[in-house]
Amino acid sequence: MERPVKVLKFGGSVLRDESDLVAAAHEVYRYYRRGIRVVAVVSALGSTTDDLMSRARRLCVQPRPELLAPVLATGETTSANLFGIALDGAGVPAQVLSPHQIGLRARGPVLDADPMDLDAAALLRELDRVPVAVVPGFVAQRDDGRLVLLGRGGSDLSALFIAHHVKADCCRLIKDVDGCYESDPALPGPPPRRLLSASFDDALALGGAILQPKALRFARDHHVAFDVAGLCGVRPTRIGRLPRIAVEADTMAASRPLRVGLLGLGTVAGGVYRELCCRPDLFDVRRILVRNLDTDRGVGAVSHLLCTDVREVLDTPCDVVVELAGGVQPATEWMASALRRGRHVVTANKAALAAHGCLLARTAQQHACSLLFSASVGGAVPALETARRLASEHVIGFEGVLNGTTNFVLDQIAQGTSFAEAVRRAQQAGLAEADPRLDLDGSDVAHKLTVLARHTFGDVPIRWQRREGIAGKLPDVPPGHAVRLVGSCHRQCETPMGVGQASPAELIASVEVRVLPERDALAQVAGEQNAVRFSTLDARLRRCEHIVAGRGAGRVPTTTAVMADLFELARAHKLRASGRSAKDTRFSAAACSQEAS
Ligand code: HSE
């Protein structure tokens, strides 16, 4: 099935510095985890273009355009490459592509050229290989190979031009405002009405403060509809061949942030806490459960938020409880208690979910709350989301590298490091569980496999054929092979005769050390990466494979996945506050309890 393409353009007003690149990475992850291929077009960070211009003008009052253009282009090139790094850190597989690599050609004045052509096939091929491409906006290439610029604000034009040529499903221009207004909302006076939709000519009439007029004319002439939104926006302004619909600004008034209770302040929870603090418009951390009030968490947690009694978190009015303490109990009871009090729960706790996931899902459903657990399997790898996306195709099984610590250790051992030293390094890198035996003896894989199996097939009994870890003697590895700890799960009967759409009666699962040829995708999973290979049958009973891979462990990737669930809740909260029925985000709870029944 062809995966949709979305073009996201991040302007300099939302990319002021490196920390904004992290926020932008969350926005890309939001689509990536839904299986959408993303082209992220970026402007230079903040005032970089003006600064470069001033520097050039200090050297020469009127620099020649062909000398100035490559200097200004470094702003977009730098932000694109930094964004590639931010996405990699967040666990989003991304590549940075130059105008040359995507054949983005332009003609006309060097500082205000018009884009003429794009090698859409090349860009789509790259997106098939790596699902996220970062492209510097504003910059194109002339036929003679010189870099040219598309005029001030030209990243809007880059994004719309690319969206048009790759026939993107959607193009979103992300700004530091939540959409377009009838006039500048920053000016004194009564707040202007906000546009939900507008025609191209309406948008042109607003002037060039928000959108580049040249880009708007291109969109109008080529019928490229697009959205204007803020980061984590819920009701963008849609520009296209559309009627002008405006609403009073106060119907869109900012809702209060989502109130968060945090259980734990370890490796992942510390990362989540920091991220929550970066978005005070969306989140308000009310209480944090810690083991010891004196421990220096290194995350700058405000001391009056800390407590050692879980009742203080559960009794504090909150909208969502984020459980990152780990372990089956008392974490399960804490989550159930939060759900019974009408709080949404976000967790990465695969051990608790494997043991009591269906009970928790039922509790969530009974109390009309969401139970979200994207981070419990695969870190930033959207394994659960992919299982869900494939639900309409017939999944017959999956297998994967699901534990970053053991994969990291196996790679280190292959390079000559001792087992003990490799484990120590994995702990130092923040990959291992609090009790690393859970990683090493295969329990962590078994937990994740159980959660993923339930998400894929429903609450079907699992027959374990084998459950082993990597602590015992490892097999000899012939040249051209790699050792991997592989978790696998498949329907009891894989032959076409046995395949039906109904849930299987039993699942066969194993966690085992395998020696794989290097050409196998699972052998290529390096370090703390995870990968899952799903097998499906198409309508003609042909077997198809779908692989999803990326960073599977560690503070930042796991934080990315936890935050994605929290942003989902924050968007639903904003939508409700703006008076529109929120899209039901209770997918995980609904999926699990439905399957459990
Ligand atoms: N200890 C886990 C691993 C962390 O190494 O994969 C992510 O669940």
Image (spheres, rainbow, N blue to C red):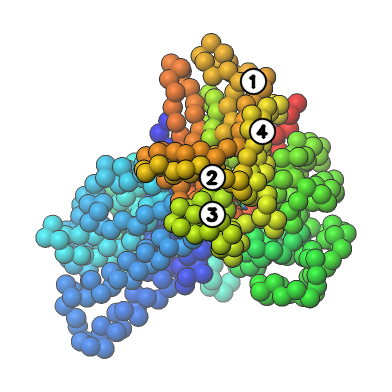
To which quarter of the image does residue 12 belong? bottom left
CB at disc 1 and ligand 1 closer than 8 Å: no
> What residue appears at the point 55 percent right and 40 percent down from the top-left corner?
513
User: Against 132, is 177 above or below?
Assistant: below
The CA distance from mark 4 to mark 2 is: 30 Å
Residues at badges 3 and 2 in contact (C-beta under 8 Å)? no
Res 361 seen here: no
Answer with mark 3 or mark 2, whichever residue precedes in sequence: 3
The CA distance from mark 3 to mark 2 is: 12 Å
Q: Which residue is mark 3?
A: 409
Answer with mark 3 or mark 4, whichever residue precedes in sequence: 3
The CA distance from mark 3 to mark 1 is: 35 Å
Of the pair 78 and 111, the residue shown nearer to us: 78
The CA distance from mark 3 to mark 4 is: 28 Å
**Disc on res. 474:** 2
User: Against 348, is 384 above or below?
Assistant: above
User: Against 181, is 467 above or below?
Assistant: above
Q: Check disc 4 and report its element: helix, strand or loop.
A: helix
**Residue at the top extreme of this rendering:** 497
> What residue appears at the point 45 percent right and 52 percent down from the top-left corner?
414
